[in-house]
Amino acid sequence: MNSYKKILADTKKILSFHRSIGIEKIPLTQGLRDFLALPIKSPQPVPVQKKPQKVELPDPEPTLPKSTGTISEIRAEIGDCTRCSLHQGRTSILFGRGSVKAKLFIVGEWPNRLDDQSGEIFSGEEGEMLDKMLTHVLNMSRDEVYLSSIIKCRVPDDAHPDSQQIRSCTPFLLNQLAVVKPEIICAMGPLAAQTLLKTNKPLIRLRGHFHEVNGTPLMPTFHPSYLIKNPEMKKAAMQDLQMIRQKLGL
């Protein structure tokens, strides 16, 4: 009987957590139907889990490049970058784009294959999702914000960048932020949020409230690519953007 009470208590906690991040309904997919139809088996001993491996983050205080005067000077210092191995497979350096007077600075994670081929950050389906987020919630266009990312070159096979690659790119992003001086930073995706906030906390615990980076408010939220694959999280992302809108006074 105690085991059933524990299951009910755990289920209640999960449902409460889902509600807190904006999930009100769980679709009854065929996969879920099949799972619910499975026969109940006697519980097996739970194996002892190994301690999770700590995520390696970049150095706490990355060394800033020399140029901090203008966006064009920062781009010139990057040049035809060969500071890490990513230059070997890239077509384009996705430096960033947008208004240098932008109130909102959006930081993504790394360019995908389509970005690399087109030379346009947040392109394709991800770009369409971002545009909808900007126009429908913030009533803004790409030209009114500044877009950049932690990593400036495509990562082969969309693998997670390593710490050396992150260290090579992050200083240039920090200088972009220093030049634009936005009122708010929106970090889209766990790599963007964890790198800028220098933390290993999961994105689900970081989103939903503002943090600060060098005195500038930062709102972590889900990356458009994640929302495409997990549409049930759109409402939570919209809530994050609504908080940005309120803070900007839009």
Image: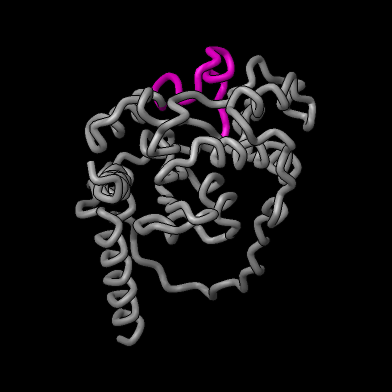
- Quarter of the picture containing the C terminus is top left
Q: Which residues are magenta?
A: 110-126
Q: Left or right: where does residue 165 sit relative to residue 195?
A: right
Residue toward you, 243 or 87: 243
Does residue 86 appear in the picture of this structure?
yes
The image's colouring method is: one colour
Q: Where 80 falls versus 111 (above or below)?
A: above
Q: Is residue 123 magenta?
A: yes
- Name the spot of residue 32 as percent of width and height, x first: 30, 49
Q: Left or right: where does residue 207 sit relative to residue 201?
A: left
Residue toward you, 43 or 234: 234
Residue toward you, 226 or 32: 226
Q: Residue at x 53, y 61 (%)?
A: 201
- Name the spot of residue 151 as percent of width and height, x first: 62, 34
- Quarter of the picture containing the N terminus is bottom left
Does residue 32 appear in the picture of this structure?
no
Q: Residue at x 62, y 73 (%)?
A: 48
Q: Is residue 140 magenta?
A: no
Name the image quarter holding residue 178. Answer: top right
Q: Where 223 falls versus 247 (above or below)?
A: above
Q: Residue at x 40, y 68 (%)?
A: 41
- Name the spot of residue 66 as percent of width and height, x first: 74, 37
